[in-house]
Amino acid sequence: MKKIKLINFTKLSLDEKKLILQWRNNPLIKKWMYTEKDISLEDHLSFIDNLLLSEDKLYFLVKENMEYIGVIDFVNISPDSLNMGIYANPFLKNKGIILLEEIIKYSFDILKVKKIKAEVFKENDKACNLYKKYNFTTVNEKNINNREVACMELINENR
């Protein structure tokens, strides 16, 4: 049986923080981010420290049994909606489903928002198809860094 644990970034050990930074700077992850430059340890630690002061952001390291499988985040949290973020451990396969299911459960069952918003590069077929499988619909498109982005959302009643 799978046991999933969400570890708040503000409660991480230094080794866990470094692990996340290693993932985030991995080319397989970085290519799907709005900021593709490497992030320094100092900037990463400062970002995590600032989460303690934020009331509309939550970041979690996700653990399945004894294995770290990825990161999920929630930003711009309001009673109406939030924006989600997700990336899997680049050294594992097929963890996106678990991560997205955790996002959906946490958003609707814990945070009680009405709508989850996601932005994804349109060429990221794997992510686009996963979101569509979970009934996310494209509501808008935009251009970031000369790349097309699908703005998607999932309304609680449609899950």
Image (tube, rainbow, N blue to C red):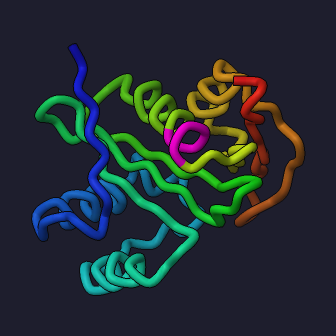
Identity of the residue drawn at 83% across and 37% down: 138
Q: Position of residue 125 (x, y in %)?
A: 63, 30
Rendering coords of residue 77 (x, y %):
63, 62
Q: Residue 102's x, y, as percent?
A: 45, 35
Q: Quadrant of residue 64?
A: top left
Closer to the camera in the image, 62 or 20? 62
User: Which residue shows up at 38% across the image and 23% down it?
Assistant: 94
Q: Is residue 2 left or right of residue 56?
A: left
Q: Is residue 69 above or below residue 44?
A: above
SS majority, magenta: helix
Residue at the far top: name it: 1
Seen at 34% across and 62% down, the residue is 25
Can you give x and y, in whole percent of width and height, for residue 21 in the image?
A: 28, 64
Look at the image and say whether residue 109 sits in the magenta stretch.
yes
* Magenta region: 106-110
Asked whether, in this view, residue 117 is left or right of residue 38, the answer is: right
| Whether residue 147 can be seen here | yes
Q: Residue at x 49, y 78 (%)?
A: 54
Looking at the image, residue 29 lies above or below residue 33 = above
85 part of magenta stretch: no
